[in-house]
Image: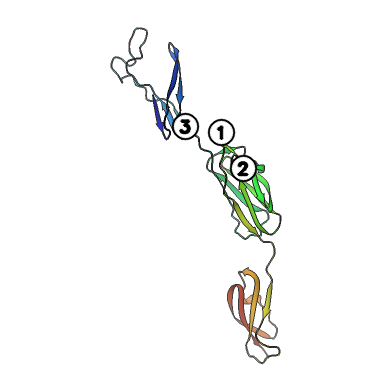
Amino acid sequence: STTATGTSGASVFSVTGSGATYTVLANTGSGSGTVQLNVADNDSIVDNALNPLGGVGPGNGNYTFGEIYTIDRVGATVALSSAAASPTNLNPIPVTVTFNEAVTGFELADITVSNATAANLSGSGASYTFGLIPTSDGAITASIAAGAALDVAGNPSTASAVFSRTFDSVGPTVALASVSTNPTNASSIPVTATFNESVTGFTIADIVATNATVSTLSGSGTSYSFNLLPSG
């Protein structure tokens, strides 16, 4: 008899042999899970003296400790991730490949990239790493196609989602402007600092003034303002 968990339709296909040795072929059904082969005693199994298995009476010769076989028909899933934020100026961009189970056959050629080159693949089992070397600034993507690797049961892996990062290796530019005319008699000259992209870390200490004191810096992202207080 068969005992199945997760699978459906498991059954004994055939029993061949004679004497003390028999071979059992089992249909593992459909789905993934486990199948266990046991012996159900109904007094039909007898020795040469017609003594039934386990003695007279059904069930007393049951064998319920048969080997449990794992049936795996589902391929490994895979995900790409990185400790690098987006945008990033890291070169190469580190990428981690994580399968949900151990696989074999995964190679650098299995990684499809755009605006970059994949390099230095290492790892084994369920975890791998590689680097993305950007070709130019802008969007960079990487993905792994279905069938790139095989699990222990020989099932091909599924496709990954597309991994993406924006590579930015060029620093921002900044321009200063004021609504005050030149010359001016204003005791506080308003100045606007405009970056060409969003920035962080801009503080009043970054502004170098001559014959004036810098005060009241405010703003965020691409736009900031401060005042120049003339010393003379």
Q: Earlier in the sequence, mark 2 or mark 3?
A: 3
Assign a secondary structure to mark 2. strand
Give the CA distance from mark 1 to mark 3: 13 Å
Q: Amino acid at mark 3?
A: Thr
Which residue is at 29% across, 14% downward?
56
Give the CA distance from mark 1 to mark 2: 19 Å
Q: Earlier in the sequence, mark 1 or mark 3?
A: 3
In this view, the residue in front, 112 or 64, is 112
* Disc 3 residue crowd, few under 14, some 14–19, many 20+, Cα 10 Å: some
Point out the frontmost of discs 2 and 3.
Answer: 3
Q: x, y (%) of residue 207?
A: 66, 77
Q: Which residue is mark 2?
A: 123
Q: Amino acid at mark 2?
A: Gly
In this view, the residue in front, 225 or 232, is 225
Q: x, y (%) of residue 75?
A: 53, 38
The image quarter containing residue 209 is bottom right
Q: Are marks 1 and 2 in contact (CB under 8 Å)?
A: no
Above or below 143: residue 12: above
Q: Which residue is mark 1?
A: 154
Above or below 88: residue 108: above
